[in-house]
Image (tube, rainbow, N blue to C red):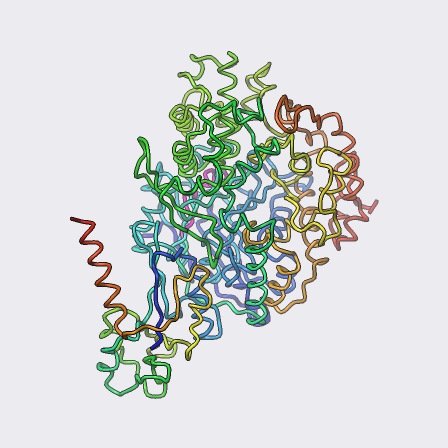
Amino acid sequence: MRVLRIHPEKCTGCLRCELACSYMQTGEYQPAKSVIRVSPFEGHTSYAPYTCTQCAEGWCMTACPVGAITISAVGAKEVQDDRCVGCKLCAIACPFGTMFYDPATRKAFKCNLCGGAPACAEACPTAAITYEDVETADWLGDFARERTARVLAEAR
Amino acid sequence: MTPATATAPKQSKSKTATTARPGAFAGNLLRVDLTRGKCWAEPWGPERMRAELGGVGLGAMILYRETAAKGGKKNVAWDHPDNRLVLGTGPLAGLPVWGTGGLTVCTIGPGTNGPTSTQANGFFGTNLKYCGYDAIVIQGQSKGWVYLYINDDVVELRDAKSLVGLDTWETQNALYRETGLVGHQLSVYSIGPAGENLVKFAAIQGDFGHVASKNGCGAVMGKKRLKAVAIVKGTKALRAADPRGLMQAAEDMSHDLQTDASARSLYEYGTLPGVVNLSKMGALPIKNYTTNLTSNVAGADMSAWEAPKLRENFDHRGHQCNACGMHHCHMSVIRHGDKKGQIVDEPEYEGWSGCGWAIGAADRDGVAWLNTECDRACVDVNEWGWLCGWVMECQEKGYITRDQLGFELKWGDIKGAHRLLQMVCRREGFGDVLAEGVKRAAEKLGGPAKDCAIYIEKGATPRGHDHRARWEEMLDTCTSSTATMETGNPVHPTEVGQPARINPFDGEQVARYVAGLRGRRGFEDSLGICIFTSRTRLENICRALSAATGWTFSVDEALRFGRRTAAINRATALRCGHTGALEYPSARYGSTPVDGPAKGQTIRAQWEKMLDTWYAEVGFDRKTGKPWPKTLRDLGLDWLAKDLWGKKS
């Protein structure tokens, strides 16, 4: 399956992904409506984008009381606007903080992989965000395990 | 936190201003009156947007209209409450074009007591426009120290007592803590001790390493007792008239940057290659213009100054401005020596020059550290280099004694230079004289010391090159109305009908070239885009602007726009008393190199002829300095022709 993969060590914090994402999602440049967000780490020396990993468990789907979150053809968990009642349970359930709520529309919104051509990956000038085939849906788990092992090894 | 004074800006009442405006503009100017403690939004309409764009286009007009002294013949001085501090962005700021976080500062600065236009990047323009404003126009003077907080429609002047005395990085970190925001969620542009103490070459620094440095704009902020401007990344939207066209133009620009021979090294290493490249031309300033041989600097090994080695000497990480894919701005960590582990902003070429070569220092770790100390104190690193190098030379020659200065300062002494920096930015002892800037300090000392000082008679100092090997920059700097280069370096000169290259030591050719290239810089500095990411064909930038706004903006219109802006700034400069008599380099600045690649080339011998040619080419009157009425009418500035020439126009 194809997933959005984040390579935080390559991110320079330029936020072009946020602009591209908000344009695809809303037709306007409005980073506040972007569903990918870049966060700073280690003072102001490093940055990392994060967005929905389309995780296998899909807690947002489990939590949604009205079945408004479905899986799209490209494997993205997608909010169906006509069903969403804006209760925000999905936003509470998401352990990654990548489910958002728009007070203007009173609906939840999230990454839908732009229907299979993610604008953030296209816009990133340093390839810190790629859209690629992975063997397992749980690539983030592999990433976390590898990084944890490395950090622990360095600490020893 | 209780705001000292708080006034929410008024919502726009003009429907035309908000409904018909191009969506690339936010639609409002944020007006701030520090005397009255009031902030309000002033809508501006599409016609004015096209005529002034933003940045220096907007700033020049505001300075001309709003800083005249009573009677209109003269201008208010830099420290007058009626002086304006315009912090402008532009129509491309906040859009997905590389390097569009732009800030242009326009004000009457203390260096020349005349207008200035000076740029920084980062995220100022992005955050401001997403809050709904295209520029901030500050007037008045606050009684106590305040900072300006902007979060969409919440605009407050907040008490800044607790920030006084902090350097610019400390100020940004303190405001992060105070607001609970971090990174690009909060863009902070502030002044450090140099600005607070009205050092006449104080800068405005923001977002860890971006500096608007010219003409003491930081001292203007200090005089107004405005410690910082803190802008939350707003929630409002910008629109492009032709989004696909905008992305296409953006991609073409980035393609140019990555592949064109004139920009490729800039894309890879920012301005780092400047050190070695300029040293080969004799344009790297070494030891206050006393030599052009790098071998005269103790410990200099030029192979260590090649761009890749310069960067790899540090642990480093990209730290880019809005939407930028250049491998330019970096944060670095010092690996060696007593500053090991300290985070610094990777110096630009001018940092390596001002904190290094100009003062005879070749210790890369020390220079990088001192450069960040300059940013934190908020001084212009160029004028700093000329000042510190001058003091070093004067001490060596006995023109400034050890007793006068309080200690001994020798070439290349980084720790001593840092001590001097602290004295200057706190105006301690002899530092009080030096804080007035190179020209005024040199004039105060007089005699042979004055002859060693690098400055322009208008009161400013040049950028960080040895212009005795770059005549076009010296002419540009001296004839400019903005206290720094107004025409800028040639970028794809053939696109605007100029030759690809000229004889750099033929005054006549140089003057024609500088005059012929005019316009581009003023246009670019009105867009909210970085000077480096705009190093592409002008046609690409015009296409980006057209796609963003829905206008059809041609290369000719762009050049005309820039020249119009320069004419307006010239009118303000004339009102400030800048006559042609001040368009000269100081004795040392215009001297003849004694060694190196430009040895024996004497610009002073050709200077009068160069001025004559330049004036004739740009259509200005050599005697009065005024643009001719015809020149102004051709630029669509009939009203200015009337102002300057009265009935004779």
Q: How many marks?
A: 0
Figure check: B409 above or below B644: above
Residue found farthest to the right: B648
Residue drawn at (44%, 53%) of the image? B320
Quarter holding residue A121: bottom left
* Residue B477 visible in the picture: yes
Q: Is residue A95 magenta?
A: no
Q: Position of residue B9 (x, y in %)?
A: 46, 60
* Residue A89 visible in the picture: no
Residue drawn at (55%, 71%) of the image? B243
Q: Is residue B227 magenta?
A: yes
Residue found farthest to the left: A156
Q: Position of residue A84 (x, y in %)?
A: 32, 84
In the picture, measured across the screen, residue B483 lies left or right of residue A104, that is right
Q: Position of residue B321 (x, y in %)?
A: 46, 54
Quarter holding residue A55: bottom left
In the picture, measured across the screen, residue B240 lies left or right of residue B582, that is left
Front residue of A5/B579: it is A5
Front residue of B252/B22: it is B252
Q: Position of residue B483 (x, y in %)?
A: 61, 38
Give the residues drawn in magenta, as a range.
Answer: B220-230
Front residue of B444/B403: it is B403
